[in-house]
Image (spheres, rainbow, N blue to C red):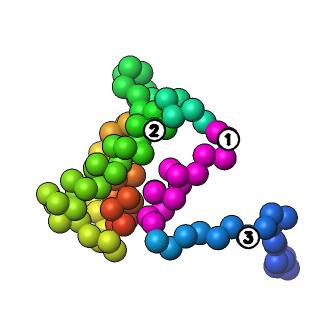
């Protein structure tokens, strides 16, 4: 049986804010100073379907508002998504997280 060790990061701890969703927090960060119009998602089956860094921010916020108003999704809810891996799936996942829920 191998002995277990305690590992620690050489980096300083990062304070994760508690007043925003994980999606809002991740999309707010831009450590590499990526241009807002940079494509970050591209569909494999149809490469013309893309989503930019700025596009996912705007569309995920709009999607979260729609999920709250139309579906009644609330913070702490769990949403089950059964779909093919695509740009639309990534946008839906971020919208669910933006709304404060989690996806399964």
Instruction: Provide the residue designation for mark 3.
Output: 13
Residue range of the region highlighted in magenta in the rendering: 20-33
Give the side of residue 99 with respect to residue 31, left or right: left
Name which of mark 3 and mark 1 comes first in the sequence: 3
Viewer-side residue, 38 vs 93: 38
Instruction: Provide the residue designation for mark 1.
Output: 32
Is 25 situated above or below 5? above
Residue at (28, 50) in percent of width and height: 63
- Tell me where residue 6 sits by quadrant: bottom right
Q: CA distance from mark 2 to mark 3?
A: 27 Å
Residue at (17, 65) in percent of width and height: 72
* x then y, percent, for residue 75: 32, 71
Judged from the image, the secondary structure of the residue bearing numbered disc 3 is loop
Viewer-side residue, 103 vs 34: 34
Viewer-side residue, 1 vs 34: 34
Viewer-side residue, 102 vs 63: 63
Name which of mark 2 and mark 3 comes first in the sequence: 3
Name which of mark 2 and mark 1 comes first in the sequence: 1
Looking at the rendering, in which quadrant would you find the N terminus?
A: bottom right
Q: CA distance from mark 3 to mark 1?
A: 19 Å
Instruction: Provide the residue designation for mark 2.
Output: 54
């Amino acid at each position: 049986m191998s002995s277990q060790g305690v590992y620690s990061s050489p980096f300083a701890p990062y304070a994760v804010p508690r007043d925003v969703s994980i999606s809002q927090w991740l999309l707010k960060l831009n450590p590499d100073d990526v241009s807002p119009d940079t494509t970050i998602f591209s569909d494999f089956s149809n490469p013309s379907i893309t989503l930019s860094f700025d596009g996912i921010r705007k569309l995920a916020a709009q999607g979260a508002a729609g999920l709250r108003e139309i579906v009644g999704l609330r913070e702490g809810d769990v949403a089950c998504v059964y779909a093919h891996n695509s740009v639309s799936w990534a946008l839906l996942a971020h919208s669910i997280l933006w709304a404060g829920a989690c996806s399964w």
